[in-house]
Image (cartoon, rainbow, N blue to C red):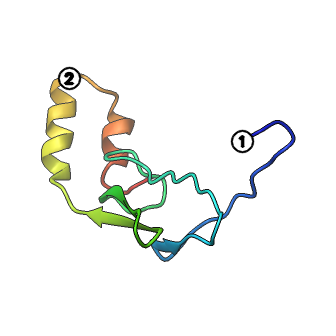
Amino acid sequence: MREGEFAIPKVVEDMFYTLEPGERLLVNVGSVGQPRDRNPKASWCLFDTETETVRIIRVPYDIAETQDRMRMQDIAEFLIERLGVGR
């Protein structure tokens, strides 16, 4: 962005978005293990440069195994527990 420009934030709820001509988009898809939307699945983003579409994909992963490995590293229990509830 150039000086004096500003962005208008928007929340895309349906996990699929088509850019308007000339539109720029910054996508925050969250992360594996520390989501804040009460969905514990891992998330990642696919941007199709030909169709100018963004798709956010959610996939399950072995949360219990991840929690066990975190405990072996002495990570704080509240961080470990939050994985299962996605917040």
Q: Of callouts 1 and 2, which one flags the residue occurring earlier in the amino acid sequence?
A: 1
| Three-letter amino acid code at the position of disc 1 | Met
Decide: is 84 above or below 70.
below
Nearest to the observer: residue 44 or residue 59: 44
In this rendering, position of residue 27 left or right of residue 63: right
Residues at marks 1 and 2 touching, judged by CB atoms closer than 8 Å? no
Q: How far across and how far down the image is residue 26, in percent? A: 57, 51
Q: How far across and how far down the image is residue 67, in percent? A: 21, 41
| Number of numbered markers | 2
* Residue at the image point whose x is 38% and y is 47% from the top: 31
How many angstroms separate mark 1 from mark 2 (CA)?
41 Å
SS of the residue at dot 2? loop
In this rendering, position of residue 48 left or right of residue 1: left
Q: Which residue is mark 1?
A: 1
| Three-letter amino acid code at the position of disc 2 | Gln
Q: Which part of the image, by quadrant, shows the N terminus?
A: top right
Q: Which residue is mark 2?
A: 73
Q: How far across and how far down the image is residue 4, in percent? A: 87, 41
* Residue at the image point whose x is 57% and y is 70% from the top: 19
Disc marking residue 58: none
SS of the residue at dot 1? loop
* Residue at the image point whose x is 65% and y is 63% from the top: 23
Name the quadrant containing residue 77: top left
